[in-house]
Image (cartoon, rainbow, N blue to C red):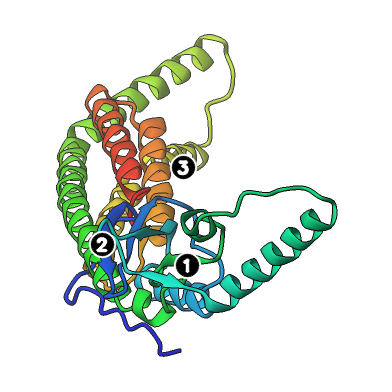
Amino acid sequence: MAAVTVNRTRGAAVRSMTGFASRQGGDSAGRGWSWEVRSVNSRGLDLRLRLPEGIDGLEPAARKALTEVASRGALTLSLRLERSAAPGALRLDADALAGVLAALARVQEAAEAADIALAPPSAAEILSLRGVVDSAGGADLPEAAALLADLPALLADFDAMRTAEGAALATVLEGQLARVAGLVDEAAAALPEREARLAETLAAGVERLLRTLGNAGGPAPDPARLEQELALILVKSDIAEELDRLRAHVAAARAMLAEAGAVGRKLDFLMQEFNREANTLCAKAQSGALTRIGLDLKAVIDQMREQVQNVE
């Protein structure tokens, strides 16, 4: 059995796991068939073949062809055999006819021996018996080679649809990444005001603490220790690292969208990292503006995760 060669769409990067294609074929013996392939998203590659039995070599060749065109997704490949609408020439099975006539003769002899009169069967009745006649080729299954000849074109159409869907997904994701990058820039622009306000808040807190200790007659805190504690508070509240990581994630996602091959799993993992940084930003915000930006980031990231679920 010759291998089925499927050429994937060249120059395509992101592909969707959603696709559909169908194709019909037939031969000169009046036999027809129709192929159909469809897919939806899945964590891995799940192949489901619905093929007629009794055709040697069909399933392994079809299964191998599917693995060449897809690496992720739940794919269902179906083949339905059809009889041509045009009537074929009748074919008389001489061996079956001889067997039927011999059986009729024995029945006639037995009836005569029992003194039973039987009406002779007509030719039409004999021809109607199963196996005596059939449409030419009607009982034969098509050869696997003839059926598989339609598979490359079918899978090429299927791949083209997944590629077109993937291009649309990439466009949506690029827009969402641009939105994330813009929100990161907004957060960076809001940092100076937030840091100045945080410094004022800390200074006021230290002043209240010193006043309280003085009124209570307690010892003044060690200036060096106080400075260390304030520095630690500032470090813990700093979000510069989160913004840097978000920028790095945006660059990584854009690079993945430009890659050839299946990148859906890597993008899905990266979405988790995006979400982690957005959650940290919200937790450290201490600013109405940064809280709003963090919530907007989480909303956009959630939308990206939904889209990424369809990427191969």
Residue at 77% x, 62% y is: 109
Whether the residues at callouts 2 and 1 have beta carbons within 8 Å, the answer is: no
Above or below residue 28? Residue 214 is above
- The answer to whether the residue labelled 1 contacts the one labelled 3, judged by CB atoms less than 8 Å apart, is no
The numbered disc on residue 23 is: 2
For disc 2, the neighbor class at 10 Å (few under 14, some 14 to 19, many from 20) is some
Picture disc at residue 232: 3
Q: Is residue 220 above or below residue 218?
A: below
Q: Nearer the viewer, residue 89 or 120?
A: 120
Instruction: Answer whether residue 48 is visible to the viewer in this image.
Output: no
Amino acid type assigned to the residue bearing label 3 in the image: Leu
Where is residue 136, by image quadrant? bottom left
- Under circle 2, the secondary element is strand
The residue at which mark 1 appears reads as 139
Please report the residue visible at 33 percent of the width from the left and 49 percent of the height from the top: 308
Instruction: State the residue at coordinates (53%, 26%).
Output: 220
